[in-house]
Image (spheres, grey):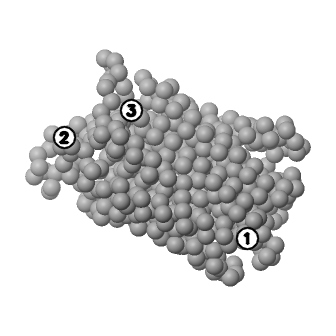
């Protein structure tokens, strides 16, 4: 596969579909559905925070750790498990992952105390570890290169939409039948969807016609880890994309985890209503992810460097809007500012994923997205809820939410550094790819 760098000077090219459009969109829909299940299982916990806090007398830090342990486990394991998926088969790996997180969610439903719940959440994280990176690698491999940012934003937005369903549906079920049934419903949904995915999606049908096992750059999926690493961290710009994406998701992860509790404590809403309202804001975050990807693809059609401008604009705007929102009194003005800040808080996801795809070889696509997932988890998704919970125990939840948006400053710096190096890194990588294509088979294998 060629590197997707700058647009051709002679005009727009015809998009190349590696597989049939219908099957590509079917795979996308089922993969998106599993991502919904992934985040429904992950975020249903946030809807029942008030119930667990009251029943088990937990601190905000303990609640935050139950949320953060999933993202932490994902971050630690996503890299090795994505390497396994690149070698063992991506579809098989996705199916096993979905079965594991669904069964672990059912285990959370029968947990008797904090310790058992923590173990259940740990196994949810193990199941989810490689899904995001491997799932998006599967999707991008069967769509035209020109759709990368749009598809990346849309696929990643499945996390926000899954959070909507997990929080809203979980809160409604918990209020009617208790918090245990909220976990049970999510686990059963995942098992059903995994069965459908395993029936419809086959590894053999995902291989583009005429594509050999080796990519155009002369690498193979079975290359040792020491061969992967230089390509995964090959430039300042790709490292900046990893870091900027992770830091910005610190903000989005905090909002997804703590907005139900925010509405419970400061707007005095019942769990079902707090979950439903928080679900609306999670939906706004997901819409922002998709919109960021679409805007990035359109704005950068003739100048790829503009992707970085989209990321910088989203990061800085979310900082201003969220800082304003959590300093306004409760009421319509605060909700409006909060909605606008949520819309932009994760708009960097699509551009960042597209930049990683452009700056790394296709042969290590799943591993590259695993590296992005690692950064997202260790810099954002894991520490966001946990650090906010620890701060909330000391300065109150509202005080903690006022501090969190400042993370966007560091994210903006990372994106600006990446923008500065992007074009020269693309030229250097294209040169390496061109030299690799001239190598003989014996040179590639040596």
The quarter in which the C terminus is drawn is bottom left
Q: Secondary structure at mark 2?
A: helix
Residue contact between numbered discs 2 and 1, judged by CB atoms under 8 Å: no
Quarter of image, res 210? top left
Give the residue furthest to the right: 329
| 3 or 1: tag closer to the N-terminus | 3
Q: CA distance from mark 2 to mark 3?
A: 22 Å
The mark closer to the camera, 3 or 1, is 1
Mark 2 or mark 1, whichever is nearer to me: 1
Coordinates of residue 16 in the picture (x, y in percent): 30, 33
**Residue toward you, 146 or 247:** 146
Instruction: Tell me if residue 106 comes above or below residue 239 in the rendering.
Output: below
Q: Residues within 10 Å of mark 1 (few under 14, many from 20)?
A: some
Q: Rounded to the nearest whole Å, what is the CA distance between mark 2 and mark 1? A: 60 Å
Q: Is residue 351 above or below residue 98?
A: above
Judge whether residue 414 can be spotted in this image: no
Q: As drawn, is 358 to the left or to the right of 223?
A: right
In this picture, residue 152 sits left or right of residue 367: right
**Left or right: 26, with 223 as reference point:** right
Name the disc covering residue 146, or none.
3
Residue sitting at 51 percent across and 32 percent down? 294
Q: Position of residue 284 (x, y in %)?
A: 66, 42
Which dot marks residue 437? 2
Residue wearing tag 1? 178
Q: Position of residue 408 (x, y in %)?
A: 66, 44
Please name the residue shown 37% across and 64% down the image: 93
């Amino acid at each position: 596969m060629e590197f997707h760098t700058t647009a051709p000077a002679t005009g727009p090219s015809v998009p190349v579909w590696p597989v049939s459009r219908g099957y590509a969109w079917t795979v996308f829909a089922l993969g998106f559905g599993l991502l919904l299940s992934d985040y429904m299982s992950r975020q249903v916990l946030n809807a029942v925070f008030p119930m667990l806090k009251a029943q088990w007398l937990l601190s905000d830090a303990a609640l935050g750790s139950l949320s953060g342990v999933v993202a932490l486990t994902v971050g630690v394991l996503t890299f090795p498990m994505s390497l396994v998926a690149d070698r063992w088969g991506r579809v098989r790996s996705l199916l096993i992952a979905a079965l594991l997180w669904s069964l672990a969610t059912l285990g959370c439903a029968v947990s008797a105390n904090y310790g058992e719940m923590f173990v259940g959440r740990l196994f949810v994280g193990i199941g989810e570890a490689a899904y995001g990176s491997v799932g998006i690698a599967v999707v991008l491999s069967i769509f035209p290169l020109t759709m990368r940012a749009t598809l990346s934003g849309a696929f990643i937005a499945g996390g926000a939409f899954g959070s909507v369903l997990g929080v809203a549906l979980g809160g409604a079920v918990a209020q009617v039948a208790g918090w245990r049934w909220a976990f049970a419903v999510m686990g059963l949904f995942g098992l059903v969807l995994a069965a459908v995915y395993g029936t419809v999606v086959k590894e053999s049908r995902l291989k583009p016609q005429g594509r050999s096992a080796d990519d155009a750059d002369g690498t193979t999926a079975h290359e040792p880890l020491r061969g992967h690493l230089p390509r995964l961290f090959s430039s300042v710009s790709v490292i900046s994309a990893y870091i900027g994406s992770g830091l910005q998701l610190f903000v989005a992860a905090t909002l997804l985890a703590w907005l139900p509790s925010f509405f419970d404590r400061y707007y005095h809403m019942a769990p079902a209503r707090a979950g439903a309202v928080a679900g609306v804001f999670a939906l706004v975050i997901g819409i922002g992810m998709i919109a960021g990807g679409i805007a990035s693809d359109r704005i950068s059609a003739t100048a790829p460097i503009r992707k970085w401008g989209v990321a910088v604009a989203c990061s800085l705007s979310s900082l201003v809007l969220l800082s304003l929102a959590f300093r306004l009194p409760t009421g319509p003005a605060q909700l409006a500012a909060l909605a606008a800040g949520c819309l932009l808080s994760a708009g960097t996801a699509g551009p960042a994923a597209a930049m990683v795809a452009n700056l790394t070889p296709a042969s290590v696509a799943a591993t590259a997205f695993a590296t992005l997932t690692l950064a997202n988890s260790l810099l954002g998704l894991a520490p966001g809820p946990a650090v906010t919970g620890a701060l909330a125990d000391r300065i109150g939840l509202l005080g903690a939410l006022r501090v969190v948006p400042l993370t966007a400053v560091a994210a903006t710096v990372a994106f600006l550094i990446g923008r500065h190096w992007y074009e020269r890194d693309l030229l250097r990588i294209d040169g390496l790819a061109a030299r690799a294509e001239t190598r003989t088979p014996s040179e590639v294998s040596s």
